[in-house]
């Protein structure tokens, strides 16, 4: 397994991507009066989906995978980043009707100098790691390096700066510009596009309306609630055709009948109501509706989760057949890993709004790179009850997406988290207890305290937050704790006793925090087929996750 | 069913198998033809009410412009008038665009690249079009064309006016000359039993299409029967006729279901199934039906006409027998003599004749109301109550629905604004507002329409929509959270169409329920206002006024004056509430209703 950091962004590895997601963030506003931290449902995600492939998106509930899917079809507004749709004929059509919002990137590349742009960015307070992420500039601040030197060392081009979404900020084009042409011609004001993309997140409502249905589609999880049950199945499937004035009314009705047959229903179901169908049949109706305009890219948001197993197989086969027939590109969101393994070409593993690992399905399942993928895969139930399986049970619950860890998002629960050097010698059991202690303190800071809790605390009464000495006794009472550790635990406990939970948390972070706590990892290439994993352990200094897991297993 | 027939539209299906539709249509035409001139008469009445409405809105505009010029001088007045016109135009163009133009004008005209919001641009285009239309109507620029004066200045407004005149003339002719089955001309109930000496002068019976057939001795009544019997025959005939209509409409629905509908089951079938076992709702339906027919056929229902009884009693004469001789007297004089005054000597009670041989099914009013016939008064009053109730419910329902759709779809700020507005309106003391507004507008032209009934309906609509909006806001929010709203967005459906197709059908049921529940409240409020001497101005009849007039006589022999109208108010309001309950249980099987589980199961089998 190669351990070098990725030298180039993923886009160049893949040939002809249809969807290019760059640093996409979707935050939900906090809304609270006191705590207005946004919920970071999707927190900076970058990946590509090739034309005709199926990308699986897996993760625990609440990890942001549905939000990501909904953001790609703009059912949620992206907070930052770009989701680029690349299909020359569509880009050409849009460019010709939204000429004012079209940017010819070649002109931009030719007119600007990378060094100049980077100088501007540095003057603007942008850090080098933001300009060139995943390239080893994490520890360098803008004041420490000269822009020209930086550009020279990174080989940064204007396209890279634009790729990171700095275009509008630098005034290279307007914030509302959303059509970008990379190769093509303009003759008499008519665009001919050979390569280019549409930034879906920046597209105005009217342009989106034209993209929706024809280029972007979504199949929902719950067939009970995604079909309007006051309309007949025919009306439901015909609606997208009506919206886009597809053909004549007669052709539309015929098309609906065709679609009904395509998804394995009968044409005479046209005048039936959704009530009259089973869950699987209803999901077929939903799929037929999404397919009505043959969209290039379809988000499948857990399309089989609400169905029973026998029906699941039928729907999955149907989806595969349709993909072959129409050349569709899927983003398949699921939490059932066996389904993902069955249908997907590549898989992305998501945790707390971040992609932990992404790569071809077989490699990812057989030889997972990321600790989180390890844990997730070990949770697949074994059909053979006698098979001995070492399941990795994750401690605690995922952190709140309002307050994600500063370093690696998985650092609070990772079984193979890197220890600071000074604690390498400590017994695993005690280290485990320290981590639990930190987890407890973290949970305490997260818990909502009511006014009565505060009042009780001030009056010195007992609250539902148990006494910290009880916790330390329970955790460390029966083991021999090294003095330096005991010292730190005592110090933290004294903070908690005084009611300064946050101080205790920070103190523990300072004392026991490792690179996993303090630094955000990068995506490292972990296999020859382009799989990348988001973990510090892929750096040469540290042991890889896989052997670490082996060690864990042996200890049990 | 073959592929070919399935692909037909509704009219295509009728063309393929026209017999059932034609049979049904024939029935409709037959039913229409026997009452044709009555329907035309109703249209004339409608036109008469619309006319001052048009004039009224013109007056309001003029009043606004005048006030602005008076108070702000020339410059200020011009600015304010222009602003007012702009506001009205903006509102109209948004409405016209949303309601009548289903396609995108901007895309049709290829104006997408203009640096301006598409919605704003579309509304501006619609607005400009409306301005042109307005100017044409206002200043009649066609009159300046040289050729037009030659044919007598037929400006656009005049042409419209002339067309209306012609139509009104035709309608009047129809009413005067086409016989109606259920009219007092065909089944008269006013007549007298001539003394033996004058029997030859006054032959028994009435003329029916030129022939005079008589069973009884009375002159001028239907078949010479006594006025009471003749009146009863007419009332029963009217209700029979209405019932036949009802049956025929139901028959039409069944014909459609059997021959022209492809869906073998729709959710509506379940609703009808549930309603068919809902006795309380059926009771409500029957009461409401009786009330509606009473209101619709009011001119033919009463034993006497409103003109004779209420509006011009001294302009109409009739004949009666006194001391063996036939006398002539005006209705007004006779009414005064036959008022119910609470003493056995001065009382015409339920199912009684007065001294002049006139039949009063539920007695007469007191002297304060000039001894008018109570039934005629009530029948015409039903129209007023129904008019105010329906109009205000329609208006407030429209406002409430539009706002519910917008607030539920966009949420956030839109919702907050409407919440604050509706709370402010609901915080006002209702009765005081009614009294205040009826006094403020008492001399305004708008208060003349339907004797103030129109103004009352507007006031009820303006103060009533918050309650209705509150009631349907919940369901609207609920449906706006459904995934099919997201789905509609995902294939590019317009917000207005999403609201109409995917939200409104779920809210409409609730609107029907709360509307029918509220209409009872409005009828009571109107009656209460009339009881207090406000609201609908005399002489236009109103149920509450009858209760007020009869109040001093409740404990006497003339108890009928207050008691019967009071009971009728109670019945009608209960009927509307019962109907509302029935509809609610039919639409929402989860609410307590009989046999909901069974029918849902049956429906699921479809």
Image (spheres, rainbow, N blue to C red):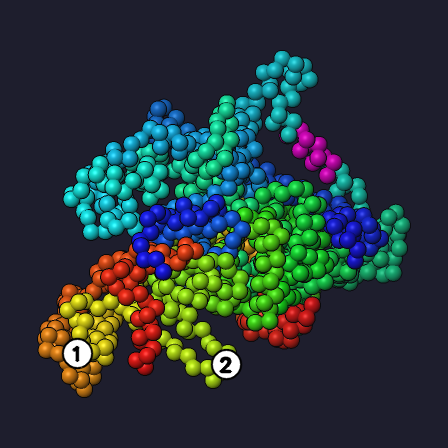
- Answer left or right for B404 relative to B606: left
Q: Position of residue B567 (x, y in %)?
A: 58, 67
Instruction: Determine which quarter of the picture holds residue B255.
Output: bottom right
Query: In the orientation shown, which residue stands out farthest toward the front?
Result: A1
Tell me, yes or no, if residue A11 can be seen here.
Answer: yes
Q: Where is residue A350 in the image (x, y as percent from the top left)?
A: 39, 61
Mark 2 residue element: loop
Q: Would residue B182 be seen by someone viewing this image from the given angle?
A: no
The subunit carrying tag 1 is: A
Nearer to the camera, A492 or B563: A492
Protein chain holding label 2? A
Q: Is residue A393 magenta?
A: no
Front residue of B322/B569: it is: B569
Image quarter in which the N terminus of chain B is found: bottom right
Describe the element under mark 1 as helix, strand or loop.
Answer: helix
Number of the label disc, if any, that sits on residue A384: 2
Which secondary structure is most common in the magenta stretch? Answer: helix
**Magenta highlight range:** B161-171
Above/below status of B319 relative to A169: below
Same chain shared by disc 2 and disc 1: yes
Quarter-of-image position of residue B116: top left
State whether residue B126 is above or below residue B465.
above
Q: Nearer the viewer, mark 2 or mark 1?
A: 2
Q: In this view, does A491 lie above or below A177?
A: below
Which residue appears at 85% of the width and 50% of the height?
B207
Q: Position of residue A404 (x, y in %)?
A: 28, 61
User: Is B164 inside the magenta-drawn segment?
Assistant: yes
Query: Which residue is the site of mark 1?
Result: A468
Q: Tell me what residue is drawn at x 59 percent, y 48 percent.
A: A293
Between B367 and A381, the one lying in front of the other is: A381
- Looking at the rendered image, the quarter that the C terminus of chain B falls into is bottom right
């Amino acid at each position: 397994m190669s351990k070098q950091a990725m030298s180039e962004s993923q886009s160049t590895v893949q040939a002809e991507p249809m969807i290019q997601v760059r640093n996409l963030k979707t935050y939900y506003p906090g809304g609270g009066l006191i705590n207005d931290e946004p919920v970071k449902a999707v927190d900076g995600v970058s990946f590509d989906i090739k034309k005709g492939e199926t990308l699986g998106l897996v993760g625990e509930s609440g990890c942001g995978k549905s939000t990501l899917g909904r953001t790609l079809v703009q059912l949620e507004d992206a907070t930052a980043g770009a989701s680029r749709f690349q299909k020359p004929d569509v880009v050409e059509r849009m460019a010709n009707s939204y000429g004012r919002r079209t940017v010819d990137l070649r002109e931009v590349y030719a007119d600007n100098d990378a060094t100049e742009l980077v100088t501007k960015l540095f003057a603007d307070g942008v850090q080098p790691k933001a300009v060139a992420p995943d390239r080893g500039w994490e520890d360098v601040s803008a004041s420490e390096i000269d822009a020209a030197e930086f550009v020279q060392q990174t080989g940064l081009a204007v396209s890279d700066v634009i790729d990171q979404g700095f275009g509008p900020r630098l005034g290279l084009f307007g914030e509302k510009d959303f059509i970008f042409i990379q190769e093509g011609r303009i003759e008499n004001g008519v665009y001919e596009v050979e390569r280019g993309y549409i930034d879906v997140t920046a597209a105005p409502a009217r342009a989106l309306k034209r993209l929706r249905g024809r280029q972007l589609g979504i199949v929902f999880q719950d067939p009970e609630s995604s079909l309007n049950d006051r309309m007949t199945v025919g009306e439901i499937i015909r609606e997208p055709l009506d919206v886009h004035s597809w053909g004549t009314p007669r052709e539309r009705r015929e098309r609906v009948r065709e679609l009904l047959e395509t998804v394995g229903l009968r044409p005479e179901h046209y005048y039936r109501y959704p009530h009259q169908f089973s869950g699987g049949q209803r999901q077929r109706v939903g799929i037929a509706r999404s397919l009505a305009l043959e969209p290039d890219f379809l988000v499948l948001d857990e399309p089989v989760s609400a169905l029973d197993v026998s029906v699941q197989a039928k729907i999955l086969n149907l989806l595969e057949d349709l993909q072959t027939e129409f050349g569709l590109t899927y983003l398949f969101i699921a939490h059932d890993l066996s389904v993902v393994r069955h249908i997907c070409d590549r898989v992305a593993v998501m945790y707390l709004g971040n992609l932990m690992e992404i790569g071809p399905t077989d490699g990812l399942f057989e030889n997972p790179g990321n600790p989180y993928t390890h844990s997730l895969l070990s949770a697949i139930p074994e059909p053979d009850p006698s098979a001995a399986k070492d399941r990795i049970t994750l401690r605690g619950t995922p952190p709140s997406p309002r307050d994600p860890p500063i370093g690696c998002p998985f650092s609070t629960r990772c079984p193979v988290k890197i220890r600071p050097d000074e604690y390498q010698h400590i017994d695993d059991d005690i280290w485990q207890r320290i981590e639990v202690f930190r987890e407890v303190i973290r949970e305490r800071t997260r818990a909502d305290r009511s006014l009565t809790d505060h009042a009780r605390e001030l009056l010195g009464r007992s609250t539902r937050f148990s006494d910290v000495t009880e916790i330390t006794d329970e955790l460390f009472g029966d083991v021999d704790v090294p003095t330096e550790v005991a010292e730190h635990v005592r110090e933290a406990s004294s903070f908690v006793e005084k009611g300064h939970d946050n101080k205790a948390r920070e103190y523990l972070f300072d004392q026991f925090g490792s690179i996993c706590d303090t630094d955000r990892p990068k995506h490292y290439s972990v296999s020859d087929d382009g799989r990348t994993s988001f973990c510090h352990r892929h750096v040469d200094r540290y042991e890889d996750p896989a052997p670490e897991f082996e060690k864990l297993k042996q200890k049990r | 069913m073959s592929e070919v027939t399935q692909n037909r539209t509704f009219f295509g299906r009728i063309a393929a198998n026209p017999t059932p539709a034609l049979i049904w249509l024939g029935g409709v035409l037959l039913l229409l033809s026997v009452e044709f001139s009555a329907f035309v008469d109703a249209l004339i009445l409608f036109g008469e009410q619309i006319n001052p409405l048009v004039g009224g809105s013109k007056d309001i505009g003029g009043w606004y412009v005048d006030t602005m010029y008076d108070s702000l001088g020339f410059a200020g007045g011009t600015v304010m008038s222009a602003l007012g016109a702009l506001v009205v135009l903006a509102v109209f163009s948004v409405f016209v665009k949303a309601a009548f133009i289903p396609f995108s004008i901007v895309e049709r005209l290829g104006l997408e690249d203009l640096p301006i919001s598409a919605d704003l641009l579309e509304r501006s285009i619609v607005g400009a079009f409306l301005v042109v239309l307005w100017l044409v109507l206002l200043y009649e620029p066609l009159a300046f064309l040289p050729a037009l004066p030659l044919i007598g200045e037929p400006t656009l407004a005049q042409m419209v006016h002339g067309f209306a005149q012609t139509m009104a003339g035709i309608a009047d002719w129809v009413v005067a000359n086409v016989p109606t089955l259920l009219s007092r001309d065909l089944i008269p109930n006013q007549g007298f039993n001539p003394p033996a000496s004058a029997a030859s002068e006054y032959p028994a019976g009435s003329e029916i299409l030129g022939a005079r057939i008589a069973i009884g001795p009375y002159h001028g009544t239907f078949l010479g029967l006594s006025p009471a019997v003749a009146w009863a025959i007419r009332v029963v005939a009217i209700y029979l006729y209405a019932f036949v209509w009802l049956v025929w409409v139901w028959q039409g629905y069944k014909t459609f279901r059997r021959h022209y509908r492809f869906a073998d089951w729709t959710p509506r079938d379940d609703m009808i199934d549930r309603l068919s076992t809902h006795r309380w709702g059926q009771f409500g339906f029957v009461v409401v039906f009786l009330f509606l027919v009473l209101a619709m056929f009011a001119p033919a229902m009463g034993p006497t006409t409103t003109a004779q009884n209420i509006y011009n009693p001294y302009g109409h004469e009739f004949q009666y027998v006194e001391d063996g001789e036939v006398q002539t007297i005006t209705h007004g004089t006779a009414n005064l003599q036959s008022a119910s005054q609470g003493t056995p000597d001065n009382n015409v009670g339920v199912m009684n004749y007065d001294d002049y041989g006139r039949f009063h099914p539920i007695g007469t009013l007191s002297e304060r109301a000039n001894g008018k016939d109570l039934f005629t008064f009530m029948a015409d009053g039903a129209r007023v109550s129904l008019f105010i109730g329906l109009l205000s419910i329609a208006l407030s329902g429209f406002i409430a629905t539009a706002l519910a759709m917008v607030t539920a779809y966009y949420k956030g700020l839109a919702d907050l604004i409407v919440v604050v507005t509706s709370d402010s309106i609901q915080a006002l003391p209702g009765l005081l507002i009614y009294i205040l507004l009826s006094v403020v507008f008492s001399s305004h032209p708008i208060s003349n329409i339907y004797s103030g009934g129109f103004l009352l309906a507007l006031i009820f609509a303006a103060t009533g929509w918050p309650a209705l909006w509150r009631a349907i806001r919940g369901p609207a929010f609920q449906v706006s959270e459904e995934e099919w709203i997201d789905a509609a967005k995902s294939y590019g459906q317009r917000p207005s169409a999403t609201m109409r197709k995917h939200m409104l059908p779920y809210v409409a049921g609730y609107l029907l329920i709360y509307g029918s529940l509220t209409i009872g409240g409005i009828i009571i409020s109107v009656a209460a206002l009339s009881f207090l001497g406000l609201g609908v101005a005399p002489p236009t009849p109103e149920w509450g006024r009858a209760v007020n007039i009869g109040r001093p006589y409740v404990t006497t022999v003339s108890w009928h004056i207050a008691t019967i109208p009071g009971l009728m108010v109670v019945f009608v309001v209960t009927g509307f509430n019962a109907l509302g309950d029935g509809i609610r249980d039919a639409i929402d099987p989860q609410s307590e209703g009989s046999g909901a589980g069974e029918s849902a199961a049956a429906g699921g089998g479809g």
